[in-house]
Amino acid sequence: MGIFSPGFSGRSRERNPELPPGQYLETGFPVLTAGPTPRIDKRDWEFSVVSETGERRSWDWQAMLDLGAEDVATDIHCVTAWSKLGTHWRGVPIDRFLDAVDTNAEYLMAHSYGGYTTNMPLEEIKGRAWLAYEFEGEDLDPEHGGPARLLVPHLYLWKSAKWVNSLQLMAADAPGFWEQNGYSMHGDPWLEERYWGS
Amino acid sequence: MSGALGGPPAGPVRWVPATVTAAWMETPGSRSLLLDAPELAPALAGQHVDIRLTAPDGYTAQRSYSLASPAGAEQLQVTVDRMPDGEVSPYLVDGLEVGDSIEVRGPIGGWFVWRPEQTEPVQLLAGGSGVVPMMSMIRTHAASGSTAPLRLLYSVRTPAGRFYTEELDRLAADGVVDLQYVFTRETPPEWPRQAGRLTPALVMEFGIVAADAPSVYVCGPTPFVESVADALVRLGHDPSRVRTERFGASG
Ligand SMILES: Cc1cc2nc3c(=O)[nH]c(=O)nc-3n(C[C@H](O)[C@H](O)[C@H](O)COP(=O)(O)OP(=O)(O)OC[C@H]3O[C@@H](n4cnc5c(N)ncnc54)[C@H](O)[C@@H]3O)c2cc1C
């Protein structure tokens, strides 16, 4: 702080209390992805939870829907500094999948079609994460992670793994894809945990 | 959290001051800035920094900008496209002056990078300002004397909209990079093709073939990256070898 830019005024004069520090309001929906967008047919789609002892439970599309979805209204925050407020999603609470396995794990690694991974503490997602398959009343676009992505809206959006296909439960924490590439292990937007050591 | 995980060297990534030491218009709509930021760690080719501006009343805005300067350069170069009605870019293009200070944070990113140790062929595909991190890779390649085959397919609206034209033409003439332009709105006189988008057919015609297992880097506006990355996968490139950087919803 302390370096001012003469003549720079910025767009919004009043600080929006719904925006975490350093974020700006975005009306579009930008895309942050490390590689090409995978195209996965719902008919081939599968989602698994694997416990730390190797116990695996899997769901196909219909079995996933049968667990019961709910509507989620939430703000989302990307590490590249944009936020969207009041977005609407539909998805199955992650707890319904986790309840199907026996575990003492404290962390998980989300794995995606295409090889993407991201890690987070298990406590962090209980009651606060969904497997989301609709955005604003429409099927989720492949660009944004469709047919289904993780939605962990209280963390930066890279934790909401697109094209997710399994959750690997782990006794100890380990870095996922962006976490190995300079980004925070935790990623709380309100604490501005963007990068290593920040 | 740093160090033990592998990847880029990382101290804490915090805001540090940077002074503008030089600035010039790269095209009518974009400007290059040279920044002196002695507290930043050396960058790898392809990384970006965050730039933060603070208004006199304390309001701040930050955006990400790729580095065009080669890996390890002391003076960092960014090139900023002016976005109509944008909050930050018009100020960087039209407001900031040589001698002014801003805040920067970084360098950031350990995935969309090219390291001189890489020996496989390298295919770069840039749309518009997506050429910025490619320039860093090309300059790093030249400075390191790398013999890895290097090709740039650069999609740009008009001849006058090209970034780094003279330097790229010189590096192409020197054999550092195999350079192909695709003009989407207007071509130079007597150009062999009509203006038009970078189609899968052109990616096939000019790109390094999948059989040569190149590392592929795609950067630009989101729709450009989406369509090019899709085309590459359909042409048989292993998705795990295609690295992408998307510059935002528009532009
Ligand atoms: C990793 C990374 C690297 C990047 N590297 C570069 C680079 O090398 N060079 C470069 O030029 N850019 C780069 N970008 C893009 C850059 O970060 C900015 O997004 C860009 O400069 C636009 O910022 P802005 O503040 O000017 O525009 P913003 O204010 O963010 O707006 C962007 C566009 O959306 C429109 N818009 C947004 N909000 C509103 C609103 N409320 N009302 C009306 N219109 C609106 C504006 O008209 C504008 O055209 C990079 C982005 C990333 C993520």
Image: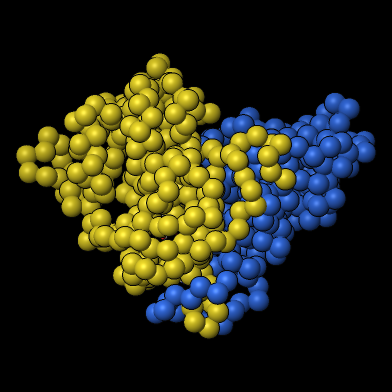
Chain colours: A blue, B yellow
For the point 72% across and 45% down, the residue is B1
Query: Is residue B139 visible to us here?
Result: yes
Q: Quadrant of the N terminus of chain A?
A: bottom right
Q: Where in the figure is residue A165, as x and y percent of width and height?
A: 69, 35
Query: Is residue B203 visible to us here?
Result: no
**Front one among A115 and B159:** B159
Q: Is residue A15 above or below residue A144?
A: below
Q: Is residue B27 above or below residue A36?
A: below
Q: Where in the figure is residue B82, as x and y percent of width and height?
A: 33, 63
For the point 69% across and 36% down, the residue is B5
Q: Is residue B149 above or below residue B38?
A: above
Q: Where in the figure is residue B131, as x and y percent of width and height?
A: 34, 44
Q: Quadrant of ligand 1?
A: bottom left
Q: Is residue B94 above or below residue B50?
A: below
Indicate the quadrant where residue A87 lies.
Answer: bottom right
Q: In the figure, is residue A38 to the left or right of A152?
A: left
